[in-house]
Image (tube, rainbow, N blue to C red):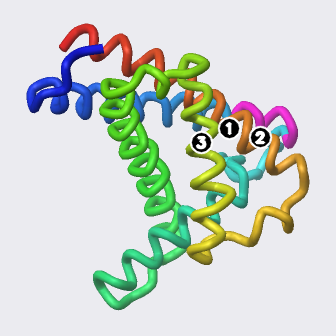
Amino acid sequence: MHKLNFDNACKSVIAGAAGGLLATVAMTTFQALWSNAINPPTHGTPESQQDATDDAATAKMADAAARQVTGEPLSEEGKKVGGAVVHYAIGTLAGALYGVASEMTPKTEAGRGLAYGLGVWAIGDQIATPAAGFSKPPTEYPLSSHLYGFAAHCVYGLALYECTRRIRERL
């Protein structure tokens, strides 16, 4: 842990944001592997087998943002691209916050980032997203959907810890 001054805060934000982006890549890869294991793609199936709950929520967020900016809804392709942008932006922002928080208190790194990843899942997926109207309440999804999100955010937290730590050491 470094003394948090402007220089260290900037380095921590950069390391956390980069770590968050990389952790989101790891999480997305895990999600694709999970989805393909549960529902193997067959000839003519869409390439993306991501969880429909997550896709719908991030696509709804992107569509809402587009409507605020342009007054127009996104096309189906725009929702797909916008949903991915929202997914990576949230992961990167959560990583930047982690970078600063882990610099301020080592407790943020509990479980090698696992606790943080699960906090992102609990606050983001289980509370904020339904409260904002981008998904149904958690009680309306099957246990398998919660396990999927839980496991994916475990991957995110562990990857975030490792990536941020290694990047921070080099700055």
Marks 1 & 2, CB-CB < 8 Å contact: yes
Q: Earlier in the sequence, mark 2 or mark 3?
A: 2
Q: Is residue 128 left or right of residue 35?
A: left
Give the number of the mark in front: 1 or 3: 3
Which residue does the numbered mark 3 point to in the structure image? 119
* Residue furthest out toward the bottom: 71
Residue type marked 1: Gln
Segment tinted magenta in the rendering: 33-39
Three-letter amino acid code of the residue under disc 2: Ser
Q: Between 147 and 2, which is closer to the camera in this rendering?
A: 2
Residue at the spot of label 1: 31
Q: Give the position of the N terminus as an image quadrant.
A: top left
Counting from the top left corner in percent of width and height, residue 22 is at 43, 28
Q: Amino acid at mark 3?
A: Gly
Pinpoint residue 79: horizontal percent, then vertical percent: 50, 68
Residue 72 falls within the magenta-colored stretch? no
Residue 35: assigned label? 2
Q: Determine the CA span between mark 1 and mark 2.
A: 6 Å
Residue 51 spot, x, y in % from top left: 72, 51
Question: Where, quadrant-wise, is the C terminus in this rendering?
Answer: top left
